[in-house]
Amino acid sequence: MKTQTVPAYAKLNLTLDILGKRDDGYHELRMVMQTVSLCDDVTVTLTDGTGVACRVAGAELPCDERNLAVKAANAFCEALGYHGGIDITLTKRIPSEAGMAGGSADAAAVLRALRDLIAPTLMDERLEEIGARVGSDVPFCVRGGTQLAEGRGERLTALRNAPRLYAAVCKPDFPVSTPALFQRSDRVALTDRPDTAALLAALEAGDAAALCASVKNVFEQVLPDEQRARIEDIKRALLVHGAECAAMTGSGSAVFGLFREEDVCRTVCEALRSAELQTFCTIFV
Ligand code: C5P
């Protein structure tokens, strides 16, 4: 049986700006996204049967089309006219409803594994196109690295790799629904926007301090008061512990602080970890 295990890396938003609502119901975005080392493991096996089967270890997740890994396998089969059976095993580490693209990362890993197993000559662009049908963040996860993402998130421009930084990721014990937060954003005046151009210039110059000075996410302004207060508390704690900057990622609820030194990042993760707060020490990849 042909089988392959690949890592599915999480992402952080260095910036996230919402430019407006589109006629198709999506929101026009401008964001800089960064792959980090925290990952799920995704094993894809071609079987003699038909259809897509899925198992998940490490989290309570549905194993039908609601799971983006299954949706990705079905989209790949439809695009390539493949009718064989596919088994997917997900070993989850990336927290769910955190703004780290955990589901999209699994979907992208499934697409990459299926390409290797079934259609090794398939171009990256085509894989990203199939990914875009599965979810807005999937093309980014197929590509990875440091990217400017526009449109609904699927239009990517490759950027110079960010300087080597460590991220202490803190996930509080409340989930955030992405569609619900996008809906709230329509009713909130976004006053404090990221300076995306400054972040792009910082990346171009390889300037870690300027990069950190430009990290910002407009979704923080959209959160209900109680959740925003919790996010602000975590950001303050990260800054007090020496983070160069701190922000929520995606639609939350994970918050990250950036550090230059791994041992400092690790110590901060240990200091902030509690029953209400999961923490992860990760590095830009
Ligand atoms: O594309 P995806 O299925 O990941 O998006 C989930 C939901 O998030 C969409 O149904 C939509 O409500 C919201 N969304 C949005 N604008 C985007 C991306 C997502 O409004 N650019």
Image (spheres, rainbow, N blue to C red):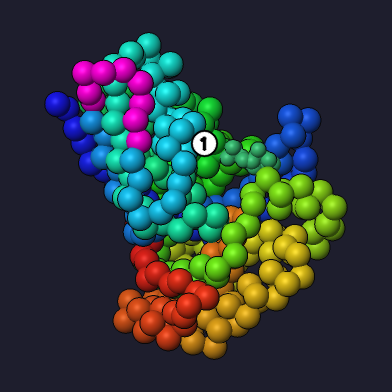
Instruction: Tell me: 284 left or right of 121.
Output: right
Q: Where residue 20 sits: x, y (%)?
A: 77, 44
Q: Is residue 39 magenta?
A: no
Above or below: residue 132 compared with residue 261: above
Q: Is residue 48 magenta?
A: yes
Specify start and end residues of the magenta stretch as a single range: 46-54
Instruction: Using the rendered image of the protein, determine whether residue 106 is visible from the camera's viewpoint.
Output: yes
Residue 200 seen by the camera: no
Q: Residue at x 72, y 63 (%)?
A: 223
Query: Label 1, on which residue?
Result: 66
Q: Amino acid at mark 1?
A: Arg
For image coordinates 46% across by 41% down, the residue present is: 62
**Residue 76 locus on image (x, y percent):** 40, 23
Q: Residues within 10 Å of mark 1 (few under 14, many from 20)?
A: few
Q: Is residue 281 above or below residue 21?
A: below
Q: Is 4 on the left or on the right of 281, as rendered? A: left
x and y, in percent, of residue 117 in the image = 23, 26
Q: Residue at x 70, y 76 (%)?
A: 229
Q: Quadrant of residue 142?
A: top left
